[in-house]
Image (tube, helix red, strand yellow):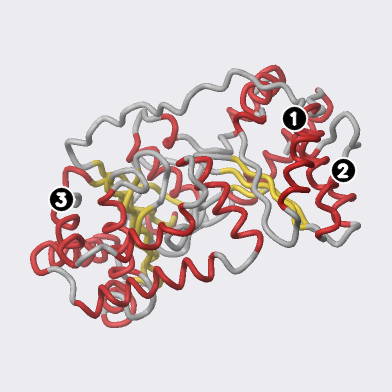
């Protein structure tokens, strides 16, 4: 939010005005692994876009007035997007339960009201000075432009910005989970029960992660998937079901989230999910299911590269996370190399009860009637929504 409040040569609100007056658009998003800022502009305005980004990287207006104003904006954003949305609070709580004291992923990117009230201006300035540096950023440009001209512009605008001492990416180890964690919470905004289940899995791009992503597609991608057929269509236990990897850079989760149909309880759906995972572990998947999953991967990669914005985002993230933007050309082959045996192997390896965390979410009315929640009910900030493989839940400015 502070990044849109002006800099040495750009007044408050002018960044938006300068871009939008030229028919462009801009925004930024934050997730647990990175923050990005992006703009779409006519090709003849590339210099403007780079100058605007460089000016705020060099001289952001971190003032008490801007800070207090944006503190209130973020608090209202939290109320609207989290505190007053059904099931939103539960999405963070499952992370808190699964990750425990593993701070990088247990804590919400937006924070809670106590965090927002306690944050001092000095902390914002310190964070900006440490991380918002050219040697800690990736600049990605996609569209109609001359590469030599773009490189010269980038050097012109960013070349003299001070490079700081950026800490190396060294995430702490996540202690293994040795027993099932289970909790129930009451959601005053929910009308129907819901549930989360999460299992710990390796980091994104680890060998097993590709097979786990395909397992998620077989179980939950589309109306012909196993769990949609059983939970939504045949038995009508759930109104909605999601299952798949969360795609974090660090220690990841394989997550399930479902909203129950009226008259059903979380345990019914969880039993079906656990049984289906055991079925894959015991009997594997069919060749048709594997080919369908491979086809979905192909479509995700092709459609994900159709727009300039999506191409720029993927190039930037591959370079930022793994030091190789060219992975955008080869990563699909890692998925297509996954075999039925790989999917069966990971189904056997990662889904023990001792490795899972379960959170039941009960409406307030049901809790009052004794159906769940009550004592031990917990309210926490959350991240609403889930994503298709390769697309993360994010806080958008």
Q: Is residue 203 left or right of residue 17?
A: left
Q: Nearer the viewer, residue 334 or 238?
A: 334
Residue 142: image location, x then y, percent = 67, 57
Q: Are marks 1 and 3 in contact (CB under 8 Å)?
A: no
Q: Earlier in the sequence, mark 2 or mark 1?
A: 2
Residue 340: image location, x then y, percent = 18, 67
Q: Nearer the viewer, residue 157 or 203?
A: 157
State the SS at label 2: loop
Report whether residue 380 is seen: no
Residue 300: image location, x then y, percent = 46, 68
Q: Earlier in the sequence, mark 3 or mark 2?
A: 2
The residue lying at 33 percent from left, 58 percent from top is 334
Q: Earlier in the sequence, mark 1 or mark 3?
A: 1
Would you place residue 284 above or below residue 167 in this image? below
Q: Residue furthest front?
A: 148
The residue lying at 50 percent from left, 52 percent from top is 326
Cα distance in 3D space between marks 1 and 3: 49 Å
Reading the image, the residue beneath label 2 is 13
Cα distance in 3D space between marks 2 and 1: 25 Å
Please give the count of numbered marks on the rendered protein.
Answer: 3
Reading the image, the residue beneath label 1 is 159
Picture disc at residue 349: 3
User: Which tag is nearer the camera, tag 1 or tag 3?
Assistant: 1
Would you place residue 296 above or below residue 69 in this image? below
The residue lying at 79 percent from left, 42 percent from top is 153
């Amino acid at each position: 939010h502070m990044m849109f409040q002006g800099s040495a040569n750009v007044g408050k609100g002018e960044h938006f005005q300068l871009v939008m007056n030229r028919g462009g658009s801009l925004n930024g998003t934050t997730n647990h692994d990175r923050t990005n800022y992006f703009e779409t502009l006519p090709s003849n305005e590339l210099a403007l876009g780079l100058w605007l980004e460089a000016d705020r990287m060099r001289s952001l207006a971190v003032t008490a007035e801007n800070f207090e104003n944006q503190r209130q904006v973020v608090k209202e954003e939290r109320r609207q997007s989290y505190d007053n949305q059904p099931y939103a609070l539960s999405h963070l709580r499952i992370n808190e339960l699964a990750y425990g004291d593993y701070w990088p992923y247990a804590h919400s990117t937006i924070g809670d009201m106590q965090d927002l009230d306690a944050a001092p201006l000095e902390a914002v300035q310190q964070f900006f000075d440490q991380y918002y540096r050219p040697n800690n950023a990736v600049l990605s440009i996609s569209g109609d432009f001359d590469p030599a001209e773009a490189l010269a512009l980038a050097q012109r605008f960013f070349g003299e910005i001070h490079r700081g001492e950026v800490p190396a990416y060294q995430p702490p180890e996540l202690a293994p989970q040795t027993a099932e964690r289970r909790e129930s919470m009451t959601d005053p905004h929910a009308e129907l029960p819901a549930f989360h289940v999460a299992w710990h899995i390796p980091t994104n791009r680890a060998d097993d992660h590709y097979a786990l992503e395909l397992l998620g597609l077989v179980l939950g991608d589309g109306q012909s998937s196993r769990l949609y057929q059983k939970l939504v269509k045949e038995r009508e236990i759930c109104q909605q079901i999601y299952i798949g990897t969360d795609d974090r850079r660090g220690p990841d989760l394989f997550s399930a989230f479902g909203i129950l149909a009226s008259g059903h309880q979380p345990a019914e759906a969880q039993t079906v999910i656990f049984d289906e995972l055991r079925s894959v572990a015991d009997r594997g998947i069919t060749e048709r299911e594997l080919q369908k999953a491979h086809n979905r991967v192909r479509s995700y990669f092709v459609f994900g590269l159709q727009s300039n914005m999506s191409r720029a985002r993927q190039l930037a993230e591959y370079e930022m996370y793994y030091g190789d933007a060219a992975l955008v050309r080869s990563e699909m082959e890692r998925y297509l190399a996954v075999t039925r045996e790989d999917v069966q192997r990971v189904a056997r390896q990662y889904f023990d009860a001792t490795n899972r965390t379960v959170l039941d979410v009960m409406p307030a009315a049901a809790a009052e009637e004794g159906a769940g929640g009550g004592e031990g009910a917990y309210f926490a900030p959350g991240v609403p929504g889930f994503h298709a493989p390769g697309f993360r839940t994010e806080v958008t400015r």
